[in-house]
Amino acid sequence: MRIKRFNSTDPDFNSNLEKLLAFENAQDDTVDVTVAKILADIRNRKDAALIEYTNRFDRLSATTGKDLELTQKQLHHSLETLPSNQRNALEQAAERVRSYHEKQQLNSWQYTDSDGTLLGQKITPLDRVGLYVPGGKASYPSSVLMNAIPAKVAGVKELIMVVPTPGGERNDMVLAAAAISQVDRVFTIGGAQAVGALAYGTETIPQVDKIVGPGNAYVAAAKRRVFGVVGIDMVAGPSEILVICDGKTDPDWIAMDLFSQAEHDELAQAILLSPDAEFLDQVMRSIDRLLSGMPRKDVIRASLENRGALIQVQSFDEACAIANRIAPEHLELSVDQPEIWLDKIRHAGAIFLGRNACEALGDYCAGPNHVLPTSRTARFSSPLGVYDFQKRSSLIQVSQQGAAKLGEIASVLAYGEGLQAHARSAEYRYKNR
């Protein structure tokens, strides 16, 4: 197969890297028009429209909104009948994810300054959150854990999960993960219509405050459109991995780490940086040898040929600088003493330290969240976490002494802005005493 090979000393390296990284996360106009119509229909006709779309797209025969909801008994039946190895894996992963996210909780705080004014911050969980989970053949129980557990740790009162069941096909691992994660209600709906139901509410589906979770192009377009009515986590692009290796890791390991992201999507991106040209050759040979044995070899091949690269750098300092420029979703530091280079990494969704920390462990069970910023948004965004399900309110309590001091400052500034009512409001607190 053909995968791009660059050297950082090439005169056209910067332009070639820019072309490699370019990804237009633009909306398809046809998709957007369709989604706009679906959302408007859900907003106007509520359950009637939701049932129509669900029956049409998922080939179901629901007649009322109640037909679309799964009971807690059904969720726990999926958990109880799951093969023991799958149940144990889910429960162990859930415990690790929960333990990690419990350390993220924000706390309220306050203090009183010298003039007796109390200032602070109150932390409050969101009341109700909607979790979108892909269904049918594309079923991801790990996404349930990664989205639901931080919400519950944050104290979200009600978590509503939607998951399409095309042709009535249900995934027991997904439903079991919902039971383990203490999801409150589950509805068998999907697509833009599910996003609309969560955002606007119907007779059956309660309106939520925020929608999280991955989905297809229609789901992504719907999330963009309802943002502002509700909050959203992010609109994610294709998955990414960047590996920095010193040439001492088994090349088969590195090849398979690149495959682990490439198999997601033809648009996924897998890049290797190393100062060792011979090692890059070894990894290329591993790729050629191992690819034929991968069930998703066609997807992997398309991803690596279209958006992958093996890049020779001059030093680890340069590798870190290029990594910051790329700002990858996943970054593996497959080197001796990776902590030496950690301070030089400023932009990455998740950083995997050392040869044993493969990205796949982060996807499933290490503990940190696998919902990560993509498409260079790691420059200003963070992984999903407990803080995404909490909000902050400022606290201000002003003493009489503080009213005089602050009122005079506010009055001067308000008059300067031409806002006399603001000034008078502040002056009343100290001039009329």
Image: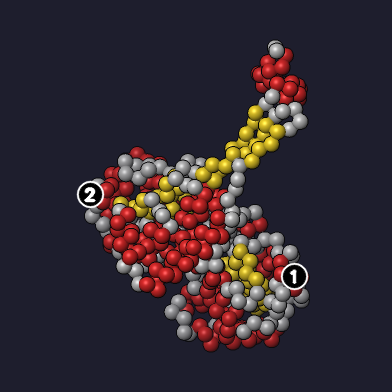
On the image, the x and y values in percent for residue 228 come to: 51, 42
In the picture shown, does residue 225 fall above or below 374?
A: above
The mark that comes first in sequence, 1 or 2, is 2
Quadrant of res 108:
top right
Which of the 4 quarters of the picture holds residue 11?
Answer: bottom right
Query: Which residue bears the numbered disc 2?
Result: 63
Assign a secondary structure to mark 1. helix
**Viewer-nearest residue: 271 or 123:** 123
Q: Residues within 10 Å of mark 1 (few under 14, many from 20)?
A: few
Which secondary structure lies at badge 2?
A: loop
Quadrant where the image shows the N terminus: bottom right
Query: Looking at the picture, which amino acid does disc 1 mark?
Result: Ile
What amino acid is at disc 2? Answer: Thr
Where is residue 37? Give x, y as percent.
38, 46
Instruction: Give 254 or 111, whichever is nearer the viewer.
Output: 111
Q: In the image, what residue occupies the spot 70% across and 83% down? A: 277
- Looking at the rendered image, the quarter that the C terminus falls into is top right
The answer to whether residue 352 is left or right of residue 314 is left
Residue linked to disc 1: 340
Residue shown at 39%/68% (left/top)?
A: 87
